[in-house]
Image (cartoon, rainbow, N blue to C red):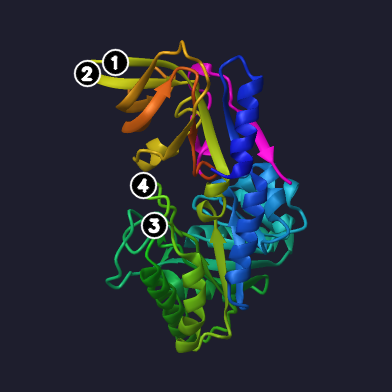
Amino acid sequence: MTMAVRKKLIHLQEQRTAPFCGYVYDLTALRHHIAGMKAALPSNCELFYAAKANPEPAILETLSPFVDGFEAASGGELKWLLQHCPQHSLIFGGPGKLPQELQLAVDRQIETLHIESLTELRRLVDIVSQRRLPMNVMLRMNISLEGLPTTRLTMGGKPTPFGLDESELEQAINIINATSLLELQGFHFHLMSHQLNVDVHLALIELYIRNVKKWSKNFGLNTSIINVGGGFGINYVSPNQHFDWKTFCERLPSIIKEQQAEQFRLRFECGRFVTAACGYYVMEVLDIKNNLGEWFAIGHGGTHHFRTPAAQSHDHPFDVLHRQNPNSVGVHNESVTLVGQLCTPKDVLARQQLVKELAIGDWVVFSLAGAYAWNISHQNFLMHDAPEMIYLSE
């Protein structure tokens, strides 16, 4: 954990008497991280933040000076971003958009709508015709991976609910060309998530570019943007082996040059890779017990606050902040399963982890909790109190 987070938690331990549970976000670390990500990108690239990863207002405010815009994946997120980031470019993707959500995007004249299907495109045509307002669109495409290795969360390259089949492309282009109110900006791809391999992801970018150039030639298109999505991986199992963004950015210009793609802007929309490392979820140990030969530590909180380990099916990395209480029940050099307060055996954050020392009253600090954590959790289950939210910024 960062020094700022450790210092804050030690200070809180000295103050608190009631059991503690909360999220701590190091906004200074987030600011340095996003600035480094943006600076590493080649000049013809844009960086958007995928708000679904963590839409907390303090997170959005911290990122605002550095990103080129924000991506919404639902009508609710779009309303949220219009409220909190009204001066920024907004793009709106995701399947199953409601007619009223399409209408909101048109009325507010957001930067771009990502089209997921022919049905959605036809609905949009009706709306812009009624409103007599223009709209920029990008077509989300699901294409063959052409033998590229997949990740453990593959969003395309196989039958999925996401994007248009290439066989529908000509029909989509004809629909767009039939109205003067729609402008085809380019194409959107997001085929893989949790990518840890730089070589594979560069090959994926190359695949996107090749397809866009082919379509441009076949259909006489003059588009300017390729949205290459996100999907850059955080390694929860080996936290020192995340996706190598710096190396990826250093090698990207050669791919662009080889593909003669200098005329395109590459738009990245990253979420998890941006915010995961700035967040920490903290549970105070309420009880330690041995049950049928296994040790369990029950913390104040659980997967209703922090669903990431359950959603990703991993044992989440953690540190222990000890408290000086000589009368506490504890264990030494034992394998312990860390669980929460829920009445379900699925409320597990890390299973059979060797701990040097752990006692009732200690604080377990789960790192990499800044993305797809609180916001994806079943927060109302059993009606436990929400965790505290603490934001650190210099």
Residue at image coords 53%, 58%: 120
> What span is colored magenta in the figure?
372-394
Residue position marked by numbered label 4 in the rendering: 237
Query: Alpha-carbon distance for marks 1 and 4?
Result: 26 Å
Is there CB contact under 8 Å for labels 1 and 2?
A: yes
Q: Nearer the viewer, mark 3 or mark 1?
A: 1
Is there CB contact under 8 Å for labels 1 and 4?
A: no
Q: Is residue 114 left or right of residue 58?
A: left
Q: Is residue 346 left or right of residue 16?
A: left
Bin the neighbour count of mark 3 within 10 Å (Cα to Cα): few under 14, some 14-19, many 20 and up.
many
Tag 1 secondary structure: strand
Q: Which mark is residue 293?
A: 2
Residue at image coords 71%, 44%: 393
Query: Alpha-carbon distance for marks 3 and 1?
Result: 41 Å
**Of pointers 4 and 3, the one earlier in the residue sequence:** 3
Bin the neighbour count of mark 4 within 10 Å (Cα to Cα): few under 14, some 14-19, many 20 and up.
few
Tag 4 secondary structure: loop
Is there CB contact under 8 Å for labels 4 and 3?
A: no
Residue kind at label 4, given as amino acid type: Val
Residue at image coords 42%, 81%: 210
The residue at the far right in this view is 87
Q: In the image shown, does 388 or 8 lie closer to the viewer?
A: 8
**Of pointers 1 and 4, the one earlier in the residue sequence:** 4
Magenta-drawn stretch contains 17: no
The picture places residue 392, in percent across and down from the top left corner, at: 68, 41
Is there CB contact under 8 Å for labels 3 and 2?
A: no
Query: Alpha-carbon distance for marks 3 and 2?
Result: 41 Å
Residue kind at label 2, given as amino acid type: Gly
Is there CB contact under 8 Å for labels 3 and 1?
A: no
Q: Is residue 271 left or right of residue 339?
A: right
Residue position marked by numbered label 1 in the rendering: 290
The picture places residue 138, in percent across and down from the top left corner, at: 56, 68
